Amino acid sequence: MISKCLFPVAGYGTRFLPATKSMPKEMLPVVNKPLVQYGVEEAIDAGMTDISFITGRGKRSIADHFDISYELEHQIKGTGKEDYMTSIRRVLDDGVFSFTRQREMKGLGHAILTGENMIGDNPFGVILSDDLCVNEGGESVMAQMAELYKQFRCSIVAIMEVPEDQVHKYGVIAGTSMKEGLYRVEDMVEKPAQGEAPSNLAIIGRYILTPDIFDILRRTEPGKNGEIQITDALLEQAKNGCVMAYKFEGQRFDCGSVDGFVEATNYCYENIYKKEQG
Ligand code: UTP
């Protein structure tokens, strides 16, 4: 029912310098696949085949990745190496890709607002591909959220419990428990100072947003770190309507950090790559 998914990929990826000096962090490979391809496969798995990227300067290789490489196709045609292309060929067959540039890095909220023309008046998914989510043998995280959307028809954020000393890195929610793993959001704080978090339920990089978010974002003032924060806009939606927070099934790796990236690589090598190789 939700066919569109937005990928904000304009960030600088400073935590991964020098690797990200001339290469987008979204193109860093986790085993043999760039991070962003995992995210796009998750979106397509959830039925969101209309994929829109918010890119920035130095991110052209992302657009190249989601296009045909005629030279390469010609070079490997009829050889055993064609198998290596199976996953990306499937993505290219199933998805439609659009790109627009965020000219100034004014925060995630601003990046999402930049996507308004591509999304229009439709509910849509948002995937931050530096959060790699896997749920081996079960529904992908975005598919779980799309299913919930059918029931609630409001914005949904994916959350997970994090240790107290980590909450300052996240947007954190407080809410009323509706049932196991599902909350109606009452408060939200972006990167709270130690001791000021309303809970240890942290928002990760998966959202479903209703299109009224764009009007709210347009009038959202810069917040934490001088950036236009999606958390601030979502709080307004929560106060005037409804936002749900969903404790997803599966695992999430923070691939924007070196430690999370290495964990994801080990996990994917053992649990995905090796299995695929038989
Ligand atoms: P991060 O906070 O991870 O920032 O952004 P970053 O620049 O990518 O990485 P570091 O902190 O410098 O290492 C969260 C997500 O929001 C996107 C990023 O691309 C990332 O997916 N983003 C952030 C934008 O697209 N535009 C912005 O202005 C800010």
Image (cartoon, rainbow, N blue to C red):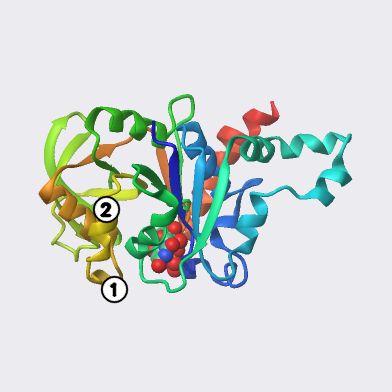
Q: Is residue 216 left or right of residue 91?
A: left
Element under disc 2: helix
How far across and how far down the image is residue 180, in percent?
A: 20, 29
What residue sits right under mark 1 in the picture? 225
Screen quadrant of the C terminus:
top right
Task: Give percent across and percent down for residue 129.
Answer: 48, 51
User: Which of marks 2 and 1 precedes in the sequence?
Assistant: 2
Q: At label 2, which amino acid type do we have?
A: Ile
Is the CB–ligand 1 distance for label 1 below 8 Å?
no
> Foreground: 216 or 15?
216
Q: Amino acid at mark 1?
A: Asn
Ligand 1 sits in quadrant = bottom left
Q: Quadrant of the N terminus?
A: top left
Q: Which residue is mark 2?
A: 213
User: Residue 167: in sight, yes or no?
Assistant: no
Q: Is residue 228 above or below residue 80?
A: below
Q: Percent from the top left, x then y, of residue 214?
A: 29, 56
At a point 29% along the width and 33% down the height, the residue shown is 149
Residue at figure coordinates x 49%, y 69% from the top left: 12
